[in-house]
């Protein structure tokens, strides 16, 4: 049975296999830098579009009234930002056809 979750360390190992001339520590730093940059851009409210993969957008969720389901008490949920993900048309087609992405 194959592993279903592909984690950052898997990305690093895959890239290390493809780019053997680049030292492993450099590959790790590159991957870490990319994720740090993406996280920083999102925290600054910027949208991220990666062609062939998808788009990350910040969605503002306004303050709203709700109820505690256990006690029935009315509560206010504060405003917050959420990340919205939308796959690209190309990726959507690939995952629905069970074909791997060519390198």
Image (tube, rainbow, N blue to C red):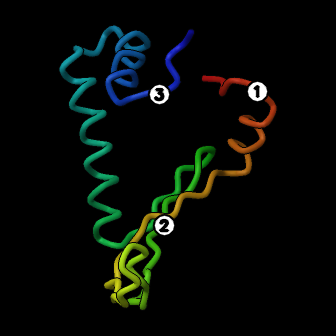
- Which residue occupies 59% across, 45% down? 53
Distance between the alpha carbons at the discs numbered 3 and 1 = 17 Å
- Which residue occupies 78% across, 37% down? 96
- Rendering coords of residue 3 (x, y %): 49, 17
- Rendering coords of residue 55 (x, y %): 55, 58
Instruction: Please name whichever residue, 68 or 63, is drawn nearer the observer in this view of the structure.
Output: 68
Q: Any mark on residue 57, and which?
A: 2
The residue carrying pointer 2 sits among few (fewer than 14), some (14 to 19) or many (20 or more) residues within 10 Å by Cα, namely: some
Distance between the alpha carbons at the discs numbered 3 and 2 = 23 Å
Distance between the alpha carbons at the discs numbered 2 and 1 = 27 Å
- Rendering coords of residue 98 (x, y %): 76, 27
Quadrant where the C terminus is found in the figure: top right
Q: Which residue is mark 3?
A: 5
Q: Quadrant of residue 63?
A: bottom left
Quadrant where the N terminus is found in the figure: top right
Q: Which residue is mark 1?
A: 98
18 displayed left or right of 20: right
Q: Quadrant of residue 71?
A: bottom left
């Amino acid at each position: 049975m194959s592993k279903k979750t592909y984690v950052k360390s898997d990305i690093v190992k895959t890239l290390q296999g493809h780019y053997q001339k680049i030292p492993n520590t450099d590959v790790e730093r590159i991957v870490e830098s990319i994720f740090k940059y993406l996280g920083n851009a999102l925290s600054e409210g910027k949208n991220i579009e990666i062609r062939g993969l998808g788009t990350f957008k910040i969605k503002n969720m306004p303050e709203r009234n709700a109820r505690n389901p256990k006690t029935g008490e009315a509560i206010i949920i504060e405003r917050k930002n959420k990340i919205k993900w939308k796959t690209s048309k190309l990726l959507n087609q690939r995952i629905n056809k069970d074909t791997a992405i060519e390198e």
